[in-house]
Amino acid sequence: MCKLDLTKPIYHDNDAAREHLESLLWPQGPVCPRCGVMEDRITKLKGKSTRPGVYKCKDCRKPFSVTVGTVMERSKVPLCKWVLAAQLMASSKKGMSAKQLQRMIGTNYETAWFLFHRLRECALDPNRGPVGGENKVVEADETYIGGKARNARKGKPVPKKMAVFSLVERDGEVRSFRVTNVNAKTLRPILVKNASRKSYLMTDESTV
Ligand SMILES: [Zn+2]
């Protein structure tokens, strides 16, 4: 009924599943879900007492993982079951019932029913819809990261300054993009792809 390689570790191993989600949701590396910052503003937390996949933002000082702000946050269902259920539902042409899902993922019916409904409400699709929408305000924001002497490692040159362009939906989602230069040529394609045309766009500068 669908061609999925069910032997892939992402369907059986929670670490592999998490790394898979990280590569889908953070193609350019971890992004703080609160501030939208990336790269050298983020540290990976390590140590025996820390769960794998936890990062900390140097700006808001709060830890986060790839599931923060998603349907999987605080779920007791193992991540690999989420990934498997999402793939099965996405690749089933005719759609499937919660009962069919239960048979395929090998959980009890209650868990399958829960996954079935959560995933239907919010598709785990890397090509998510645009931010904003009718009567919503999207703010475009440019941040420059790096380029500060205090961030340089001892004896290493000061890291090059880098521009990060963020689209912030008021009271909503933040999406960040690394750009080489902040100008209309680099920003327009990001805007067209990621911000709904129905939203009001607010920028500090008139580059876009
Ligand atoms: Zn932060």
Image (cartoon, rainbow, N blue to C red):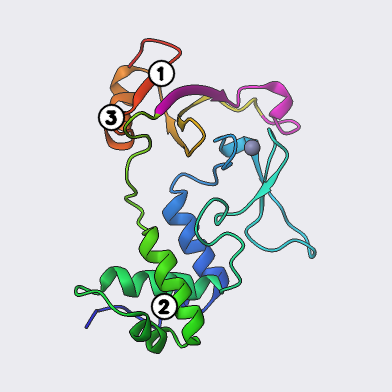
Question: Mark 1: is the Cβ under 8 angstroms from ligand 1?
Answer: no
> Picture coordinates of residue 66 (x, y %)?
55, 54
The quadrant the C terminus occupies is top left
Q: Is residue 161 visible?
A: no
Taking depth in this image into account, of 85 and 170 the one nearest to the observer is: 170
Please tell me whether mark 3 sits on a helix, a strand or a loop: loop
Q: Residue furthest front?
A: 135
> Picture coordinates of residue 163 (x, y %)?
48, 25
In the picture provided, is 73 more to the left or to the right than 181? right
The span picked out in magenta is: 137-156
The quadrant holding residue 165 is top left
Q: Residue at x 30, y 78 (%)?
A: 4
Taking depth in this image into account, of 10 and 88 the one nearest to the observer is: 88
- Answer with mark 3 or mark 2, whichever residue precedes in sequence: 2
Q: Which circle marks residue 8 in the picture? A: 2
Please tell me whether mark 1 sits on a helix, a strand or a loop: strand
Q: Residue at x 41, y 18 (%)?
A: 202
